[in-house]
Amino acid sequence: MQKVEDINFPIYRKYKNGKRFYKIINKKEFEEIQIIGTKIIINHIKATQLPGFNFINDLIGDYEGFAEVCGEGEYEMVRNK
């Protein structure tokens, strides 16, 4: 697993079902896009407790079980729908 200190942020991930997209801004902050039917909900989240930090760490380095790499272009295309 790559060290968080060595990562060039932002990085992008998406759930394998294509219903959630993530822009990880830094090791404490991310933006999430949720697709619910035809609605798109965008949340900006700053982690302040351990569960949030763990989720971001999972998105960065231990995501293969639930997510995959997403490019900036794909993320922005979904965000701008």
Image (cartoon, grey):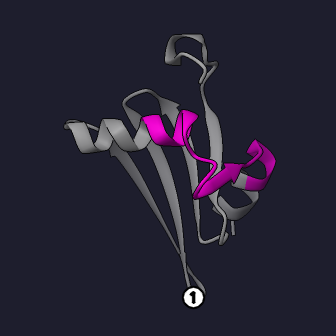
The quarter of the image holding the C terminus is: bottom right
Residue depicted at 60% across the width and 72% down the height? 19
Q: Quadrant of residue 18?
A: bottom right
Q: Callout 1: 10 Å neighbours few (<14), some, many (20+)?
A: few
**What residue appears at the point 56 percent right and 50 percent down from the top-left corner?**
22
Q: What percent of the width, then of the height, locates residue 66? A: 58, 58
Magenta run includes residue 21: no
For the N terminus, the image quarter is: top right
The magenta-colored residue range is 57-74
Relative image position of residue 52 (x, y in whole percent): 30, 43
Q: Is residue 70 magenta?
A: yes
Q: Nearer the viewer, residue 70 or 61?
A: 61
Residue reaching furthest to the left: 49
- Which residue in the protein does label 1 denote? 37
In the depicted view, which residue is nearer to us: 34 or 18?
18
Q: Label 1 sits on what residue type? A: Gly
* Side of 73 relative to 48 (left or right): right
Residue sitting at 77 percent across and 45 percent down?
71
